[in-house]
Amino acid sequence: MSGPNMGMPVVPSTEDEDDSFGEAEYAAINSMLDQINSCLDHLEEQNDHLHARLQELLESNRQTRLEFQQQLGEDPDDDDDDYYYDAYEAAYEDDDDDDASP
């Protein structure tokens, strides 16, 4: 994609032409909208993939931290780090709720 017109040449209108769009212009606009839609779908898929990977990483880090605390003989419930995990998860749960609305 090379710019706002995505490689489509912009043809200036002449005084002889109608000001209304013709079938070719609507087809070009539909094509551009399809390309934009495809790009947005791809970005959404990447975002979903990254979100899933971050969730896995958070859970892995939580498990590792609990194992280290157990090895050190600390009480895992005394740590306030869960606040950060819970805040992250709550933020993404709110985003997920927004996605579900029509």
Image: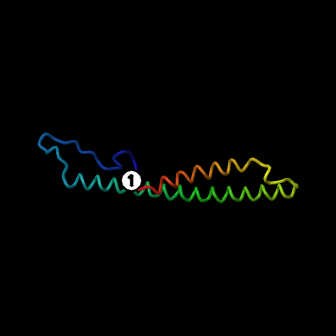
Q: Is residue 63 left or right of residue 49?
A: right
Quadrant assignment, res 72: bottom right
- Figure colour scheme: rainbow
Where does the image place residue 12, in percent across and percent down from the top left? 22, 42
Left or right side of 67 for 82: left
Q: Which residue is mark 1?
A: 36
Local packing at callout 1 (Cα closer than 10 Å; few below 14, some 14-19, many 20+) is some
Q: Which amino acid, mark 1? A: Ile
**On the rendered structure, is 87 left or right of 79?**
left
Please, which residue is most extreme toward the front here? Answer: 77
- Residue name at image x 50 percent, y 59 percent: 45
Depth check, front residue: 72 or 77: 77
Q: Nearer the viewer, residue 16 or 79?
A: 79
Residue 65 place in picture, x, y as percent: 77, 55
Give x and y (percent) for residue 91.
58, 49
Tell which residue pokes out farthest to the right in this image. Answer: 73
Quadrant location of the C terminus in the rendered image: bottom left
